[in-house]
Image (spheres, rainbow, N blue to C red):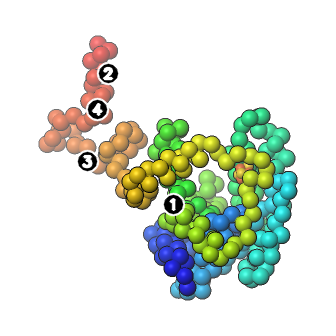
Amino acid sequence: MSDLVTRILRDVGRAVSDHKLIEHGDKIMVAVSGGKDSYAMLDVLRRLQRRAPVRFELLAVHLDQAQPGYDGAPLRAWLEADGHPHEILREDTYSIVVDRVPEGATYCALCSRLRRGILYSAATRLGCNKIALGHHRDDAIETLLLNLFFSGRIAAMPARLVSDDGAHVVIRPMIYCAEETLAAYAAERAFPILPCNLCGSQENAQRKQMKALLARMESEHPGVKGSVFAALGNVRPTQLLDLGLLGRSDEPKRGAPGAGEVSGASLGAGRLRVLGE
Ligand code: SF4
């Protein structure tokens, strides 16, 4: 076994255990886009399946979105040669996206929303209780920065997420894996990668900027990406300003010792009152 796969297996095992991603009896739909990350995910989950103490099923599902020039043959051949149980879906989301997205705007948001809906329905039809997506550490930290810089929100990607209607659990077993490790593993295994830009859509420009920013920071300060990622598991809610998080257990009770020391939030409220008088 190569060093790369050992490292990936260790990271996936840690994510599975930390976030309880896989349980006995699960039937997991593994979403395989044909990109390096999803190939690596399927490959590694299969290895984990062989050695795990719990029994679970894997079903690889690939969605052909009818993009011009699409050729899924290399992926199908790989799935068959490696003996992965799989299902290929075909839905023309390409025409819908081209039709609905205004000129000059990027396709990716609508495209991925449609894809998610199709995968959720397929999971129900195929009896899968979980859907595994191949997002990794770098996706999570890029998303954090995107939300921070452009959405005024501190949010990234959870390792485990129950869908809004409670019907599906989305899991991200690769969330602790560095993208460069997955890229090196994909090259080592010569996965037959399908390009994801056949639709002519640009990869989200802002995400590219985040990637470039992180790469520059990492080259100047090695370890920065690891530090940003570690912050996602090291949140101090009392040192933020979200009023929803300030129903705090450390807040002194009225009349209790220390109640006269006004917290930042209530100090703000007091100031407003004074200004209004
Ligand atoms: S690159 Fe193309 S296929 Fe990938 S999400 Fe964007 S629009 Fe969809």
Nearer to us in this view, 51 or 128:
51
Q: CA distance from mark 2 to mark 3?
A: 23 Å
Q: Point out which mark residue 250 bears.
A: 3
Kindly identify which residue carries mark 1: 137
Q: Nearer the viewer, mark 1 or mark 4?
A: 1
Q: Residue at x 29, y 49 (%)?
A: 249
Kindly identify which residue carries mark 2: 272
- Mark 2 CB lies closer than 8 A to ligand 1: no
Q: Residue at x 27, y 35 (%)?
A: 264
Kindly identify which residue carries mark 4: 266
Nearer to us in this view, 246 or 113:
113
Q: Secondary structure at mark 2?
A: helix
Q: Residue at x 64, y 45 (%)?
A: 204
Q: Residue at x 26, y 30 (%)?
A: 267
Nearer to us in this view, 208 or 95:
208
Q: Secondary structure at mark 1?
A: helix
- Tell me if 18 is positioned left or right of 87 in this view: left
Counting residues from the start of the chain, the first of labels 4 and 2 encountered is: 4
Type of residue at label 1?
A: Arg
Where 3 sits versus 227, above or below?
below
